[in-house]
Image (cartoon, rainbow, N blue to C red):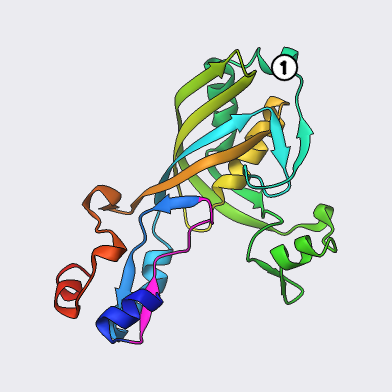
Amino acid sequence: MNYIRNVTGIRKVGHSGTLDPLASGLLIILVGRNYTKLQDVFLKKKKTYVCTAQLGIETDTYDSTGTIINKADWEKLKNITSSIVELALKSYRGDFFQTVPAFSAIKMNGQKLYRKALKKTLDLDSLPQKKVTVESLILTKLQKDLKNKVIYITIEATVGSGTYIRSLIHDLGKQLGVGAVITELRRTKIADFSVENAHKITGVKTLSYARKIL
């Protein structure tokens, strides 16, 4: 946001929803009061992600940057197939309540969860839940690395506002009985806006150019 403020000279800048530290992809930047007042509209739009997950481990952050807290035995893990994953994914479609990740910016009792998690003062059994919507979950790839005894899956997810893909993958791993963490996450669409038509933020060099694309 500061980069856009410096380029445009406009202080009123907003966005369409933050990305996880591990994530990349589409972020709609709203410049000027006429657009920032529409922020809530964009925040509520459905979003599409492509994520790669490693089966067989669990971490405290639900992604590959965290500390491993559980690891599945290969003899159990190797039996996971595309059909098994696809069947499990059917459990996560429509509206349901999702447990918020411990490492998130959601506040509980006035304090952000990730701060409590870092201090080891967070009761994991009392994590808040929120209602989310999952429109579709499509398994596009399952890859077994027999040499390293690892399985990776790639999923395309179209979800409503506020849905944590990390939590979806964590819950999927629990249901499969082997654990799962995200290793890559990319936001590809927000409503009808696609990352394929987006500009790299570092490509915005001048106010006149910014006005053409923002």
- The verdict on residue 14 being magenta is yes
Label 1 packing within 10 angstroms: few (<14), some (14-19), many (20+): some
- The verdict on residue 62 being magenta is no
Q: Is residue 18 above or below residue 46?
A: below
Q: Give the position of the C terminus as an image quadrant.
A: bottom left
Q: Residue at x 67, y 53 (%)?
A: 101
Image coords of residue 6 (percent x, y)? 32, 82
- Residue 110 picture quarter: bottom right
> Can residue 37 be seen here?
no
- 132, 174: nearer the viewer: 174
Image coords of residue 63 (percent x, y)? 62, 44
- Residue 119 picture quarter: bottom right
Q: Residue at x 19, y 76 (%)?
A: 206
Q: Residue at x 24, y 64 (%)?
A: 203
- 15, 89: nearer the viewer: 15
Q: Residue at x 56, y 17 (%)?
A: 145
The residue beneath circle 1 is 74
The amino acid type found where label 1 is placed reads Trp
First to last magenta residue range: 11-22
Q: Is residue 66 above or below residue 156?
A: below
